[in-house]
Image (spheres, helix red, strand yellow):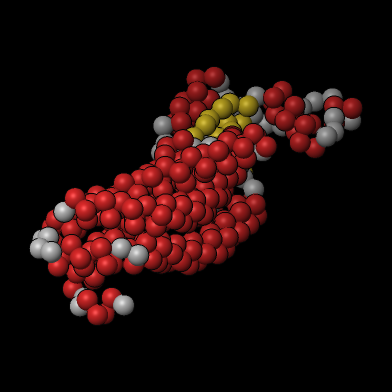
Amino acid sequence: MAQFGKLSAGRSKPSYVYSIIGVAIVLLIMGIMGWLFLNFSQASNAFKEDIRISAYLRTLNKDSISQIQQFIAGQPFAREVKYINKETAKEIWNKENNEDWSKFLDYNPLPESIDFYTKAQYVNNDSLKKISTVLMSAYGNQITDLQYPQSLVSSLNERTSKLGAIFLVIAIVLCVIIVVSIDTTIRLAMFSNRFLIKTMQMVGATRGFIVKPMDLRAVLNGLISSVIAIAILFSVIQWAENQFPQLKAIHNTQLTLILFGGMIAIGVGISLFSTHRSVMKYLKMKLDDLY
């Protein structure tokens, strides 16, 4: 049995190395696609959460304004709420329009408002209409109007849906290719060990004795491949975020860790499944069928 161990080590090292590298490359491609999808999702949410909604107020005292502000802040849709007085409203208008109308008017016609930003899932016309209904029902005698860029909201949701659908189709196709590629790589690695597996069976080794070390080796190889792919992907992410600061602004550490965890799970899972299936296949085959 010691001879078989030496034979196993001597014959399997090259195939294991190629298998580890091959699986790592495929996992890296999967990781890059996953990272691009996360950035697309985060960028879309960032755009949505940057849309300002303005509740214009009648002339009110500070207590009434504070009450409305607290009411909005306590709603599940609210992400950020702030009171805009007439002077601040003027500054915002001048900045957005690149014009100072104080040269033509000696008074400020802009009303006070409570500006707020909603969470991304509420940035669609149906949800915003419901929000408007809630606010006008509660403070219709104090809020004169509720405004937001309806055309921008519609356009943003439409484009996000189309791009998301395209990305989903690409991701599904790529996932199938990745699974098949990893499975093929593992099976080719095990093909070079088919005679070793059969020889061990012929000298009386049980299936458990043959399968267990190879399954453990598959788990180890999957982990090594995953770590290599994650290390390269992490370097790519760091480089990209240094080159494009906008990517760093939408970086989500939790989602990135989930992506890394998914890469490990897929690498280990498929390596173990493919290895176990291949070993069992060769154990069931007749010796003549191995040639």
Q: Position of residue 150 (x, y in %)?
A: 62, 52
Q: Nearer the viewer, residue 171 or 163?
A: 171
Name the residue rendered at 46%, 66% in the picture: 177
Work out whether 111 lies above or below 216.
above
Residue 4 visible (yes or no): yes
Instruction: Specify the quadrant of the image occupied by residue 194.
Output: bottom left
Name of the residue lying farthest toward the bottom: 288
Work out whether 2 lies above or below 53.
below
Q: Position of residue 268 (x, y in %)?
A: 32, 51
Q: Nearer the viewer, residue 75 or 240?
A: 240
Q: Position of residue 285 (x, y in %)?
A: 21, 76
Instruction: Specify the quadrant of the image occupied by residue 7.
Output: bottom left
Name the residue rendered at 42%, 52% in the picture: 17
Name of the residue lying farthest toward the right: 103
Q: Position of residue 246 (x, y in %)?
A: 64, 38
Name of the residue lying farthest toward the top: 62
Q: Nearer the viewer, residue 35 or 116?
A: 35
